[in-house]
Amino acid sequence: MALQVWLDGRLVPEEEARVSVFDHGLLYGDGVFEGIRAYDGIVFRLKEHLDRLYNGARVIMLDIPLSQEEMTQAVLETIRANGLRDAYIRLVVTRGVGDLGLDPRKCPRASVFIIAAGIALYPEEVYINGLRLITCSVRRNSPDALDGSIKSLNYLNNIMAKMEAIRAGVPEGIMLTTDGYVAECTGDNIFLVRGERLITPPTSIGNLPGITRGAVMEIAARQGLEVREELFRLASVYTAEEVFVTGTAAEIVPVVEVDGRPVGAGKPGPVTKRLLDGFRELTKTDGEPIYP
Ligand code: PXG
């Protein structure tokens, strides 16, 4: 059966879900988006995802033509229309259809679409054996230019870095700020473990405030770990006891090698495993029920 896509207020079969070549999301990457996940009938932290979306829209002065409550209902309706309990949801808001110039005033109405698809799970192997990472030479955008805390449609920077990782034979790469501090990965946040302490870079340097990152910080505190947001360089990564990355698709994935150096014992560590167990528990209850 064709996917039903929510497009500007209507559910339409995927082959009818088309946007204009004059849409400024396409012409200029002018818009914001979210990647959200549902676990067994519950949309994980939907409110937090929508808060991030609406905050990003506010920063770029984009009027979303639905209230946050209406957007919540639109997301749930889209998942229901596709009969899904486990899903990956992509929600996109673009500046809308305009002319060929940059001027967003020529776009009278934002376009909104919501895709709810079956989720392509990470292979269980990565949770067991861990990931290898490289550091990408492509730097994270300076937040003075484009603030990475906005999940905007401008992902070229991350895509360039991702290509570099793929060319090096690994699925994910570390991105640095222009000052050489570790920022995040191309589509995931990063954490280090030292003793009973978790360290992750602050979002003020232009990282995405990941929903998974936020959940991990809460779980860690509940598990008695100290959580710190601080700047660090690659040497701290190379000498950490454990490293892991977090993201909606990835959840929590252990990292076992960075730039050819084994991390800790070179295998997934106990703190990472405990956090992943805690995270998977949380996904059973924390979020918006799809079929109440
Ligand atoms: N940093 C960046 C730059 C991201 O794009 C995350 C961190 C993790 O955030 P959440 O909220 O998911 O915990 C993201 C989100 C993909 C893909 O296909 C990944 C993201 C977005 C879109 C696609 O890998 N990551």
Image (cartoon, rainbow, N blue to C red):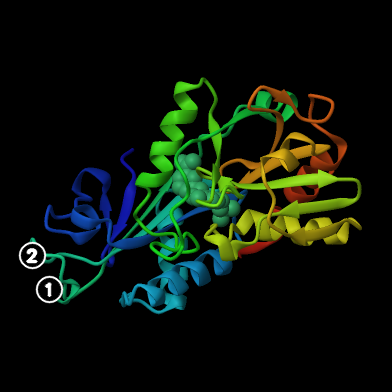
Count of labels in the image: 2
Residue 225 visible in rendering = yes
Q: Which residue is mark 2?
A: 99
Q: Are marks 1 and 2 in contact (CB under 8 Å)?
A: yes
Query: Which residue ends up furthest to the front in the rendered image?
Result: 179
Rendered residue at 44%/73% (across/down): 54
Dot 1 crowding, Cα within 10 Å, few <14, some 14–19, many 20+ = some
Name the one closer to the observer, 40 or 99.
99
Q: Is residue 32 left or right of residue 236?
A: left
**Earlier-in-chain disc, 1 versus 2:** 2
* Disc on res. 106: 1
Name the one closer to the observer, 99 or 44.
99
Rendered residue at 76%/30% (across/down): 263
Q: Is residue 19 left or right of residue 151?
A: left
Q: Quadrant of residue 230?
A: bottom right
In the figure, 121 relative to 74: above or below?
A: above
Q: Is residue 106 left or right of residue 141?
A: left
What quarter of the picture does the N terminus occupy?
Answer: top left
Q: Secondary structure at mark 1?
A: helix
Residue 93 in percent (x, y) is at 33, 63
What quarter of the picture does the C terminus occupy?
Answer: bottom right
Rendered residue at 24%/67% (across/down): 95
Residue 120 in percent (x, y) is at 51, 34
Residue 179 in percent (x, y) is at 55, 52
Amino acid at circle 1:
Lys
Q: Quadrant of residue 211?
A: bottom right
Amino acid at circle 2:
Asp
In the figure, 71 relative to 221: above or below?
A: below
